[in-house]
Amino acid sequence: MTSIDGSFVTQRSLDLHRAKYNDLDKAQRTAFGGTIAQLKARLSDRLNVSSDDEGASQWHKQLTQAVALGQPAEFSANNKGEHCIKVYAVEKLQPRCRQLHHLIFHDNSFCAKIRSKLLPSATNSLITNCISLGGGPGFDHISFCIAAKFLHDIQPKRDVLLSNRIKTMVFDLYNDDWEPVMKSLAQCFDDEEHLTMHHADLRLDLADEAHEQLRTSLQSVDLIIAQFVLHENASFIAKEVEIEGVRQKRIVGVVRDILAMAPVGTIMIITDSANTLFPCLKSAAKENGWKYLCAEEQLREEGKRRAYLGPKSFLILDRVRINN
């Protein structure tokens, strides 16, 4: 991690004590824990639900079935009075935000580049444009904002620095169901201006008329995040095709189009409870000029530990060129 004046803040120190976390690493976890606990309490009060509500079990069953079938969960059909979706938002706020936040601070070159996009500025307030695919009420936005604030607060000359502003556009199949909860979360976080909800259907192509806003936002995107959504749509995202007489799975639809159209310099973060799509995703990414890193490559090639309390499976893509 590099500070404003060019000195190394964490990358070197993260390697000093492998058995124990260094002070700065502990600090970012402590800062996250305090912020997210307060936010969860405020959201629970505002939505008038508890994470221990029985409605959470209904969502777990739907999500487990969705991953097994490779098809999106039927959230709306089980949303009685919007209660279950509120329960899910409160219950998943801390673990979902924690997984992305801690991955951002992991010690590898890909995550270092992510952090560089969140640094404050000495001259003007920077804006980092994020696309959250299937991001529900805005978990990804919260993770990026907490990380950006920490990166600002640890700078020696933070009093004269302007924090990075995170602008996140959430694209979700159930945008109408999520939008009221997203607005409540944004109000609790005091950031109603930079978090918006839009419709997207990963079963369709990017050229579909439903994806006009997604196509536009891709032109200036910095970070794309897809947490626990791709494997729920695996039956639509990966299809068997025949290439030179050989049957093989290929990425199709909107995910294929995003990999083809995203600007050079874009980082895409994929986290999930499974990694069965990763071989297809890595192949498609390589064909379109992306470098990649996932848990398996990191353990084998860099010899470093997994992200503590991070996602069980992750894939980070960095677009370095546009192939002809």
Image (cartoon, rainbow, N blue to C red):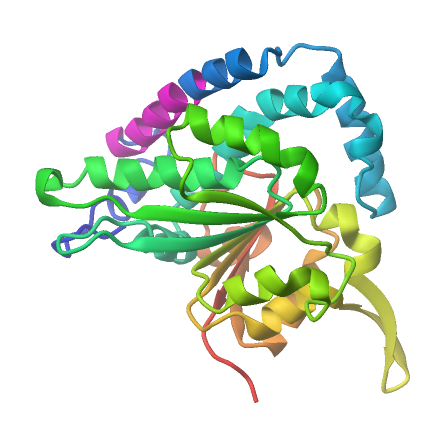
Which secondary structure type mostly characterizes the magenta part of the structure? helix
- Eyeballing the image, is 176 above or below 234? above
Residue plotted at (15% across, 57% down): 6
Q: Where residue 131 sits in the image (x, y, percent)?
A: 52, 53
Q: Nearer the viewer, residue 23 or 305?
A: 23
Camera-side residue of 29 and 190: 190
Which residue appears at 55% of the width and 84% of the height? 323
Rendered residue at 34%/23% (across/down):
30
Q: Is residue 170 above or below residue 302?
A: above
Magenta highlight on residue 68: no
The range drawn in magenta is 23-37
Dividing the picture into quadrants, the one containing residue 85 is: top right
Horizontal and vertical percent position of residue 263: 47, 72
Q: How many marks?
A: 0
Looking at this view, name the residue that lies furthest to the bottom.
324
Q: Is residue 309 visible?
A: no
Can you give x and y, in whole percent of width and height, for residue 313 in the image?
Answer: 62, 45
> In this rendering, would 38 be left or right of 252?
left
Q: Position of residue 297 (x, y in %)?
A: 55, 57
Residue depicted at 61% across the width and 67% down the height: 258
- Residue 259 shown left or right of residue 38 in the figure: right
Picture quarter with the C terminus: bottom right
- Res. 164 in view: yes
Residue 31: within the magenta?
A: yes
